[in-house]
Amino acid sequence: MNPILKEQQKKIKEKKEKARKYKLKQTRNMRERGHKLCGTASGVHGYCMKCHAKKEIINAQKVNLKTSRKVYIGQCIDCDTEIYKRKDE
């Protein structure tokens, strides 16, 4: 592969990563201030596969699946990945 092309791809990748980190930082700041567009914390925690850690779920909703299993569905408070948490009965 052409070294110039490699360097350009590397710069593009770094730029995208920088933009993603900035967006996450802005979203966290908005949540801390209680911004209405950022969702509400529900007190339900689940394991985020992207963060590889147990995180609080925002906008958690109780849902019954087709298999008659009850779960909470929401988003990770840090990366906005969708999280499923089985409801303990």
Image: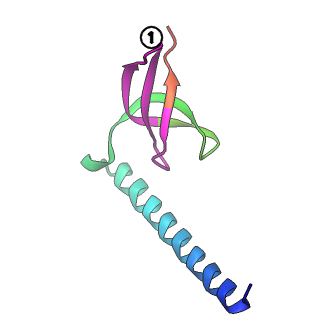
Residue in view at x 59 percent, y 74 percent:
13
Q: Is residue 38 left or right of residue 25?
A: left
Residue in view at x 49 percent, y 50 percent:
79
Q: Residue furthest left?
A: 36
Q: Residue furthest front?
A: 1
Instruction: Give how far across and how far down residue 64 sits, in percent.
Output: 39, 16
Query: Which element carries disc 1, helix, strand or loop?
Result: loop
- Residue 45 versus residue 74: which sits nearer the camera? 74
Q: Quadrant of residue 5?
A: bottom right
Q: Residue furthest bottom?
A: 4
Residue in view at x 33 percent, y 38 percent:
40
Q: Is residue 14 magenta?
A: no
- Residue 9 versus residue 29: which sits nearer the camera? 9
- Residue 29 versus residue 58: which sits nearer the camera? 58
Q: Is residue 61 magenta?
A: yes
The residue range painted magenta reads 57-83
Residue picked out by circle 1: 68
User: The residue under label 1 is which amino acid type?
Assistant: Ser
**Count of numbered tags:** 1
Residue in view at x 69 percent, y 84 percent:
6
> In terms of secondary structure, what is the magenta stretch mainly?
strand
Please, is residue 17 above or below residue 64 in the view?
below
Mark 1 Cα within 10 Å, few/some/many (few <14, many 20+)? few
Structure colour scheme: rainbow
